[in-house]
């Protein structure tokens, strides 16, 4: 009976189509999910399907929810190169950049189109704004298919993104995020120069007081 069950599972592992992307067993395919225009402009979501030869669980990996967090986006590019679909049991679904408007403008947390945080509007709705339609598309096409889901984030976005887009929208920066880089971000050479200058100032102050 176990052999019969395994053989049936192998037969049932057929092609998988998501949006415009179709991957057959043992194949890797990439393409886009289209998010149509609605109350505002539409967008596209780049995805990859890694379809193993054998049937198994489906793992979804989502990057680029916040467009300024580039580390997960680069990580998925590397994962795609490393995976061997012929040796894989199950399927890996990769959402390379969930929030393309935010990625293109490098905004922190909020969409430059509707001002919403994609991470806070799931499961979304197709009659909503672009962030809500992105969430609804990812929910329908990716999340509902997955047995396991990893929503990938990074801590670099707030430190590396200009506040100009927020000022253009008339919004304030969160109090928890520094507006200017702390001294710990300076290079070792800059810190040495700053330290030497402080030492000279202290020395000059001591000589002045001594007079």
Image: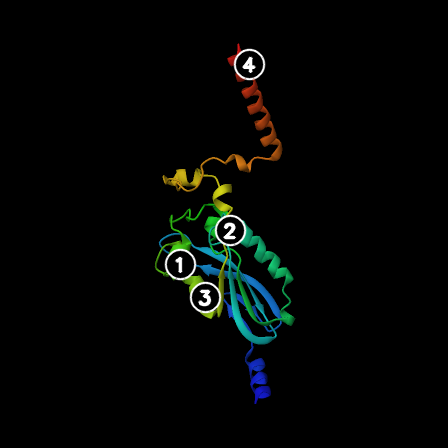
Helix or strand or loop: what does disc 4 sit on? Answer: helix
Helix or strand or loop: what does disc 1 sit on? Answer: helix
Q: Which of 65 and 207 is in front in this view?
A: 207
- Above/below status of 80 relative to 184: below
Quadrant housing the N terminus: bottom right
Residue 62 pos. (x, y %) = 50, 59
Q: What color scheme is it? A: rainbow
Work out how far the residue at label 2 is from the one at label 1, CA to CA, in angstroms. 23 Å
To which residue does mark 3 refer?
A: 143
Work out how far the residue at label 3 is from the one at label 1, CA to CA, in angstroms. 14 Å
The residue at 60%/60% (across/down) is 79
To which residue does mark 4 refer?
A: 207
Q: Which of marks 3 and 4 is in front?
A: 4
To which residue does mark 2 refer?
A: 154
Q: Nearer the viewer, mark 3 or mark 2?
A: 2
Q: Is residue 83 left or right of residue 125?
A: right
Mark seen at residue 133: 1
Whichever of callouts 3 and 2 sits on the residue coming sooner in the sequence is: 3
Q: Which of 210 and 32 is in front in this view?
A: 210
How dense is the environment of label 2, judged by Cα within 10 Å: few (below 14), some, or many (20 and up)?
A: some
């Amino acid at each position: 009976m176990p052999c019969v069950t395994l053989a049936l599972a192998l037969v049932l592992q057929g092609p998988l189509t998501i949006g415009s992307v179709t991957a057959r067993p043992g194949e890797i395919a990439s393409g886009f999910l289209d998010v149509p225009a609605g109350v505002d402009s539409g967008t596209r979501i780049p995805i990859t399907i890694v379809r193993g030869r054998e049937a198994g669980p489906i793992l979804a990996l989502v990057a680029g929810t916040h467009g300024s967090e580039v580390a997960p986006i680069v990580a998925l590019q590397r994962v795609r190169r490393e995976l061997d679909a012929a040796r894989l049991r199950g399927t890996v679904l990769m959402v390379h950049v969930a929030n393309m408007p935010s990625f293109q403008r490098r905004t922190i947390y909020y969409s430059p189109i509707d001002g919403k945080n994609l991470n806070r509007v799931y499961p979304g709705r197709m009659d909503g704004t672009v962030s809500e339609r992105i969430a609804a598309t990812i929910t329908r096409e990716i999340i509902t298919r997955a047995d396991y889901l990893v929503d990938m984030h990074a801590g670099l976005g707030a430190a590396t993104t200009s506040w100009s887009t927020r000022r253009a929208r008339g919004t304030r920066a969160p109090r928890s995020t520094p507006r200017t880089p702390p001294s710990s971000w300076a290079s070792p050479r800059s810190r040495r120069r700053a330290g030497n200058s402080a030492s000279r100032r202290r020395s000059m102050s001591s000589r002045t007081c001594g007079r």
